Amino acid sequence: MAQWAAFVGLTGVVCTLLLALARLSQHVVRGDDADATGSSDAPPSPPDRRRTDEIPRFVPPEAGADSTAERPLRADGELAATGAPGGHDPRADPTAGDLSTGTLLANVALTQGLFGGLLLAGAWYFGIPASAFGVTDAGLSTGLPALAVGVVLGVSLYAVNEIGAVSADAVGVEHDERLRSMLAPDTGSGWLVLLLVVLPIIAGVEEFIFRAAVIGATTAGFGTSVWALAVVSSLAFALGHGAQGRAGIVVTGSLGFVLAAAFILTGSFLVVFVAHYLVNALEFVVHELLGIEWAEKGVGG
């Protein structure tokens, strides 16, 4: 029992550190509003509901006011291009420490990997069995059936997420996507790194912490109600995505609960990992790589 208590305690520490880092990232991504207006109390300009993936990668100062007027940030109305009064490009934001997209991707991969590695080392040290994390030899745990369920769940959650984003646009609810735009690569090799390294690390670490450890290991060690833990893990998961705005927190919390339910019902880490990865990957590919916008055209348009 002592080893289970120690591991659950370590899980709590890792969750706290991860949420603290997410809070810091939120200030970096969204704290630019005060810099752009000169005061955090200044009223924002009228919002434009265009998504942040319309922000150009680079806008030369000589592009003129007409080009910047076409690309305001979706959540707060700040102009996307630099070189115009009140203009702002999150990729060139000094509050982001002048980091390139590659540096940001490396930072995300390393920090997420550190948290996941720390918790994985703790599981090994305290002798927590893999079955507690949803890894067994059952077909619905690690076989092709689990992979198929994960794919169907991921694509379905992505579709629901897109509908939620369009609905939020329609009623004027804030959901900020600057972080996604900042992480979108500019090169083919960058996209390979994002899709094959960074996003799998993010999905793997977050599912290992919020679903496998918080729900699976805690239940296995103490017999706690899985549904109560599903609520707790989903709330923590939502708070960790505060940079996406109010609607983003609600949507992410709901997504987290669905993933928690899938983990409970299937007992499979692979299912939730695949589903989580596909939601993130499809968002990047559809909006950042292909430039498709449902909010502008209407879903299916």
Image: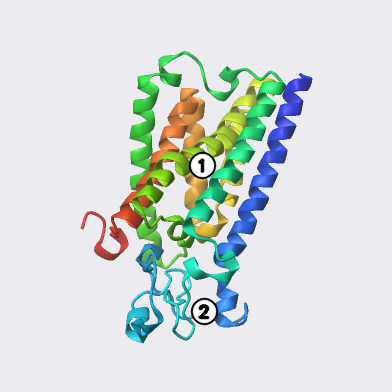
The residue singled out by tag 2 in the image is 44
Task: Report if residue 224 is visible in the image.
Answer: no
Q: Position of residue 69 (x, y in %)?
A: 36, 81
- In the rendered image, the vertical position of residue 69 relative to residue 136, given as above or below: below
The residue singled out by tag 1 in the image is 202
Compute the Cα span from label 1 to label 2: 33 Å
Q: Which amino acid lies under the numbered mark 2 shown in the image of this protein?
A: Pro
Measuring 49% from the left and 48% from the top, which residue is drawn there?
Answer: 252
| Frontmost residue, 241 versus 281 | 281
Measuring 38% from the left and 68% from the top, which residue is drawn there?
Answer: 55
- Tag 2 secondary structure: loop
Of the numbered discs 1 and 2, the one sitting upstream in the chain is 2
- In the rendered image, the vertical position of residue 129 relative to residue 202, given as above or below: above
- Tag 1 secondary structure: helix
Task: Report if residue 275 is visible in the image.
Answer: yes
Which label number is shown at residue 273?
none
